[in-house]
Amino acid sequence: MAVIDTHFISGANRPFLTLGSEEYARPLSIGTNWNQLRIILLCAIRADGTNNIANGGIVLGLCSGLSPYGASNTGHFAGVCFGTIGTPLVTYTYNANSGNPYYSAGYPQFLVRVNGVNTIGVQSSSVNPAYASTNVRFIRSCLYISITKGSPNFTFNFQVSNSGLMATDISYTGLIEIAEALTLNGSGTGLGSSAVAAAVNEAANGYLDTLNIYWPRSGTPLELYGIAVARIS
């Protein structure tokens, strides 16, 4: 069950929403009236001591209506999995990092899911992101994606924090700066992908009009401190 709680971070109590083997889906107020969207998360993963987390994968993107990625028969989803899609999913590896712990989790994948089947999974093999861990200390890190419509291909891109940023808490103000930046480069990020094109057929499979976030692990929930969606065009 999703829970709202707080951690004391950077001098104040910061509220967050937990996702543990759950997902968040919220229709966009602009519906399908967009050409390019940027979706940004301010987040951390709750640590299980110093143990690795098996079968992880932060999935971020858009779904059609309230038929999200984690449903048994997802209608239509397009976005990025921060961790490799497969059976089992990727292991998130704990790194102590001299008192600034984080998880690393292989290479992100761009994917489209139609009727419960991942039809595309293009791996970005040049990027190995870092995800903040609420273990020794509480900090927040960012990950975000850009989706640009095309016909027939949509273009996907992303930015994430790297291990060198795990000593720095990213604020909500930093989140908004990223959302409003002119290009896909903002404060709090150190790694990015090249653009990847993937075929998306909204007319046949459903129009992408709902924000969707999914995390498959219940014992080590994903903590969401902020979400921003920016219509670039």
Image (cartoon, rainbow, N blue to C red):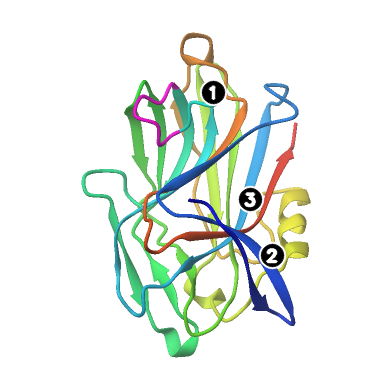
Secondary structure beneath dot 2 equals loop
- Residue drawn at point x = 78 percent, y = 63 percent: 173
Dot 1: what SS?
loop
* Image spot of residue 75 (x, y percent): 43, 21
Residue at image mark 1? 64
* CA–CA distance in space, label 3 to label 1: 19 Å
State the image quarter where residue 151 is shown.
Answer: top right
Using the rendered image of the protein, determine whether residue 21 is visible from the camera's viewpoint. yes
Q: Which of marks 3 and 1 is in front?
A: 1
Question: Is disc 3 surrounded by few (<14), some (14 to 19) or many (20+) residues within 10 Å?
Answer: many
Residue type (three-letter) at the residue carrying disc 3: Ile
Question: Which mark is on residue 187?
Answer: 2
Q: How far apart are marks 1 and 2 (CA)?
A: 31 Å
Q: Give the range drawn in magenta.
A: 69-75
Amino acid residing under circle 2: Ser
Q: How many C-alpha atoms fall within 10 Å of the one at disc 2: few (<14), some, or many (≥20)?
A: some
Q: In this view, does 113 lie above or below 145?
A: above
Query: Which disc number belongs to residue 40?
Result: 3
